[in-house]
Image (cartoon, rainbow, N blue to C red):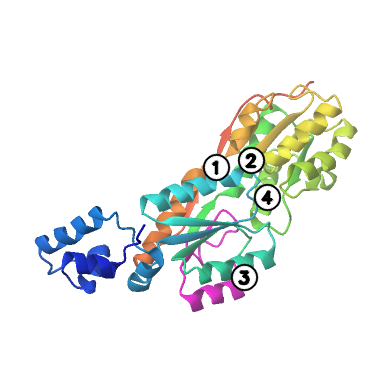
Amino acid sequence: MKRWTIKDIAKKAGVSITTVSRVLNQKEEGMSSQTREKVLKVMEEVDFQPNQFARGLVTKRSKTFGLIVPNISNPYFPELCRGVEDEANEGEYSLIICNSDDQTDKEKRYLRLLEEQQVDGIIFSAKDHLDTSDEEQLNRAKIPFVLIDRGKEEKKHAGVFLDNDKGGYLAGKHLIELGHRNIACITGPKSIILSNERLEGFKRALNEAGVELLPSHIIEGDFQMEMAYHKSKEILLKKDVTAIFACNDMMACGVYQMAHELGIRIPIDLSIVGFDDIPLVSALIPKLTTIRQDTYEMGREAVKILFRKLANAETKSIIFNPKLVVRDSSTAPIQ
């Protein structure tokens, strides 16, 4: 089956190649409606599919965005990816998703790949902050970018961020109001800003109530279920902790597993609060109390900012507010 080119279309329609190109790229000012309709009719007759790469050479646009995420296996990120993809598709853009595994070298390789693919913009949800070398590379390539979720650089770079401090505060206040005083926290990596923000907000809620979060009750995790499962064992065996705040839902799932193996009843013996509200947690038994962030809408907003950048319009960061979702995993401690 013959693959038609714009040269073939021009010959069949009896117009110049430039005219066909103008119709394809919707630059039809000064063109008669008859000429436009004639070209479109020929395209329809032969089921013409324009070569996107060749078209990009003319428009200087590839109609493609890149998205870099740190761990696609974490259920938090598919929801984010879906929001990005849906908003990009509505703007007739395609999406290349890159999973960096939180590895700086791998992320840099993906940056080079996306530059080679001539993407029109990049959305980062991959690291705590943007390296100077990465920023310089993007500026040299003249690729606009938007930060999402990781870090808090809204004053320096336009992006979409969550008020993580407030989220941690909501978790702490909830447990305090239930009557808990002996509380532990499983954080994310100390190297990640949002992890520290959640911990600081949590500690602030406890401090307001005159409750100290003991250093021995702060466990550094990695946002993964397996590590939380292993690291929570020591605290759970002490039998004195009545509540745990896990700084993401995957780590809360790890605590669930260890508590079950130790015969600790949730929430009778132990209350648990997570963070993210990934779809999985409403299926846990008991259902997990958690801090919700609207990941899908955050993804959509990131793309809207990127489109504004492409249009050279003014851009500013958007801060999302978290929400406490009370379910069955938190209750008052046994007196």
- Quick one: label 3 or label 1, which is nearer the N terminus? 3
In the structure shown, which secondary structural element does the residue marked by tag 3 occupy? Answer: loop
Question: On residue 131, which mark appears?
Answer: 3
Against 87, is 315 above or below?
below
Q: Amino acid at mark 2?
A: Phe
Q: Marks 1 and 2, Cα distance to the nearest angstrom?
A: 8 Å
Kindly indicate whether the residue at mark 2 contacts the one at mark 1 (C-beta within 8 angstroms). Answer: yes
Nearest to N terminus: mark 1 or mark 2:
2
Residue 21 in the image: state x and y as whole percent. 26, 69
Q: Which residue is mark 1?
A: 293
Question: What whole-number distance in Å separates the C-alpha atoms at marks 4 and 2?
Answer: 14 Å
**In percent of the image, x 41 and y 50: which residue is there?**
87
Callout 1 amino acid? Gln
Q: CA distance from mark 3 to mark 2?
A: 27 Å
Of mark 3 and mark 2, the one earlier in the sequence is 3
Going 86% across and 37% down the picture, which residue do you hit?
233
Q: Nearer the viewer, mark 1 or mark 4?
A: 1
Closer to the N terminus: mark 1 or mark 4? 4
Label 4: which residue?
Answer: 200
Between label 3 and label 4, give the one nearer the viewer.
Answer: 3
Give the magenta part as a residue range.
Answer: 130-158
Residue at mark 3 to residue at mark 4: CA–CA distance: 24 Å
Where residue 275 appears, as percent x and y from the top left, is 64, 40
Quick check: is 124 in the magenta stretch?
no
> Which type of secondary structure does the marked residue at label 2 adopt?
strand
**Residue type of the residue flagged with mark 3:** Asp
Q: Which residue is mark 2?
A: 275
